[in-house]
């Protein structure tokens, strides 16, 4: 019995889990954490961070050790004759060198790498913003379609009542059979509209699932959000929004970082015109053993004794002055300056894109709000017309066809209000987003 209750409660828990509804914040947070584009750019940032570490390591000295063993056999010329010269040689060395001067090349390399890391981080933020806006748009589309479902459900209920009434009046002979047929056709049309609206909800939810890159979509749903019945015009000017957007939008900041990176690369390229001063130090020793045999071999010092006797040290400064390298350095500097121009042009392109998006969002918000006000007035008139049509039909002064036309007009007007309301909301959220206000509903 205990196992049975465990299974029952377990199934109940699974049912609740399957019915989980995602908020907009949950959708956005999940997407930016699991989206493959975001992950790809995180790897790009890690690569840039590795380049920065490599650049910083340039300040450290390079240290190397060497060990050499060799054996030689043969005759050695000596006067008019030769002697046997078989020997074993061994040598060991330890050396270090460090760059002392190259007109700040190491520092400039580090600075360029830092700007590259900054740009890669802003690239990640840009992709996160793009995904967030796509999810917000689909989320509002889902809410709009859900509202249209409610409108369609109400239309089905009214058509059902109309059909039930027509069925009664037709059966008692007060209305013609065509009235019942028209009522039945109207009910079928409203049911079809409801099914279409429900499919559109599923399609919008599926679009969110794809943005979230979830493997399962059938049980996915979003939270219902209470949208105010009436909306007020709440707009900042596009110029005010742009002042903030140019300061905070990551695509702008990424382009600015790349300009600094390009300028740093030009400075790095110029260091090739300057001399390079390198300091070095080393330790070395060697061992030599004659293999011919005889007294000479037995009189040789041992390995450690020879290493001690032959131990040496060296320090030095090496100056490398560039004189002519076929003009390659000059061409590299010119290429770096071209890259600076490209980076500056990219910044202007990003600013232009942001400006166009902000201006479009403001235009859409203005237009959608005007459309919303007109749709509200049309909805009021359509509702009044439907009420008059119902009363006239009940009094026998109009046909059921006139009632159906009035009902369709009212449903269309309700749909237009919902469409304009959600379009306005998205435009408003987009403007707020560029102004630095997080997405929320």
Image (tube, grey):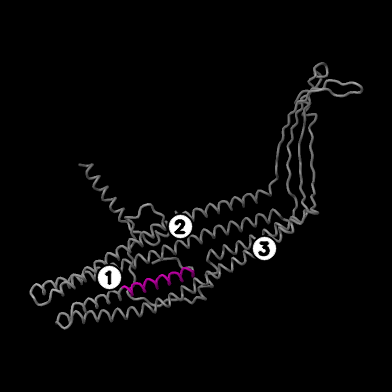
Task: Tell me if 253 is positioned left or right of 307 in this view.
Answer: left
Could you tell me if the residues under marks 2 and 1 are in contact, i.e. CB atoms within 8 Å? no
Placement of 91 over or under 439, stated as above or below = above
Viewer-nearest residue: 10 or 136: 136
- The image quadrant where one finds the C terminus is bottom left
> Could you say where residue 363 lies in the image, as x and y percent from the top left?
46, 76
Task: Please rate how many residues cluster around mark 1, counting C-alpha atoms within 10 Å: few if below 14, some from 14 to 19, many from 20.
Answer: many
Q: Which residues are magenta?
A: 415-435
How far is the residue under mark 2 from the one under mark 1? 34 Å
State the image quarter where residue 378 is shown.
bottom left
Tell me the element at label 1.
helix
**Mark number for residue 151?**
1
At x 64%, y 57%, the residue is 112
- Total of numbered circles in the picture? 3
Depicted 321 relative to depicted 378: above or below = above
Real-space Cα distance between discs 3 and 1? 59 Å
Residue 338, disc: 3
- Report the residue at 74% width, 39% height from top: 95
Dot 2: what SS? Answer: helix
Question: Which mark lies nearer to you, 2 or 1?
Answer: 1
- Compared across the picture, whether 424 is left or right of 349 comes to left
Whole-Å distance between the Cαs marked 3 and 2? 35 Å
- Residue at (30% x, 74% y) in the render: 412
Counting from the top left corner in percent of width and height, residue 302 is at 77, 23
Q: Residues within 10 Å of mark 2 (few under 14, many from 20)?
A: many
- In the displayed image of the protein, which residue is found farthest to the right? 80
Mark sitting on residue 32:
2
Return the disc, 2 or 1, that comes first in the chain's sequence. 2
Q: Is residue 91 magenta?
A: no
Look at the numbered disc 3 and give the secondary structure of its residue.
helix
């Amino acid at each position: 019995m205990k196992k049975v209750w465990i299974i029952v409660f377990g199934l109940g828990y699974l049912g609740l889990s399957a019915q989980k509804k995602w908020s907009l914040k949950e959708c956005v947070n999940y997407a930016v954490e699991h989206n493959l584009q975001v992950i790809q750019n995180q790897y790009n940032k890690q690569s840039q961070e590795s380049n920065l570490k490599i650049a910083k390591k340039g300040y450290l000295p390079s240290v190397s050790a060497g060990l050499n063993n060799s054996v030689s056999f043969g005759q050695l010329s000596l006067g008019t004759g030769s002697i046997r010269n078989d020997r074993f040689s061994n040598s060991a060395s330890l050396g270090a060198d460090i760059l002392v001067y190259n007109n700040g090349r190491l520092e400039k390399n580090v600075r360029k790498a830092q700007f590259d890391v900054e740009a890669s981080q802003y690239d990640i933020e840009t992709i996160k913003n793009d995904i967030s806006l796509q999810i917000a748009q689909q989320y509002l589309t889902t809410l709009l379609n859900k509202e249209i479902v409610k409108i369609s459900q109400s239309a089905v209920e009214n058509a059902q009542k109309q059909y039930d009434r027509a069925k009664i009046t037709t059966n008692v002979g007060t209305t013609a059979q065509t009235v019942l047929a028209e009522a039945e056709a109207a009910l079928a049309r409203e049911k079809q509209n409801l099914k279409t609206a429900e499919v559109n909800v599923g399609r919008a939810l599926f679009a969110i699932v794809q943005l979230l890159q979830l493997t399962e979509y059938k049980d996915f749903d979003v939270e219902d959000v209470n949208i105010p019945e009436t909306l007020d015009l709440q707009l900042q000017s596009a110029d005010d929004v742009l002042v903030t957007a140019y300061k905070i939008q990551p695509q702008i900041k990424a382009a600015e970082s790349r300009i600094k990176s390009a300028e740093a690369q030009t400075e790095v390229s110029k260091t090739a015109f300057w001399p390079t001063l390198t300091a070095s130090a080393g330790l070395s020793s060697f061992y030599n053993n004659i293999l011919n045999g005889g007294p000479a071999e037995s009189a040789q010092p041992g390995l450690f004794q020879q290493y001690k006797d032959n131990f040496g040290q060296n320090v030095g400064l090496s100056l490398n002055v560039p004189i002519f390298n076929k003009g390659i350095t000059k061409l590299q500097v010119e290429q770096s300056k071209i890259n600076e121009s490209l980076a500056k042009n990219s910044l202007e392109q990003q600013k232009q894109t942001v400006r166009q998006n902000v201006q479009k969002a403001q235009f859409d918000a203005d237009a959608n709000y005007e459309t919303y006000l007109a749709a509200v007035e049309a909805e009021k008139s359509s509702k009044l017309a439907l009420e008059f049509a119902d009363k006239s039909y009940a009094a026998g002064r109009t046909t059921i066809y006139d009632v159906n036309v009035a009902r369709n007009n009212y449903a269309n007007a309700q749909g237009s209000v919902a469409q304009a309301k959600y379009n306005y909301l998205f435009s408003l959220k987009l403007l707020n987003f560029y102004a630095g206000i997080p997405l929320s509903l």
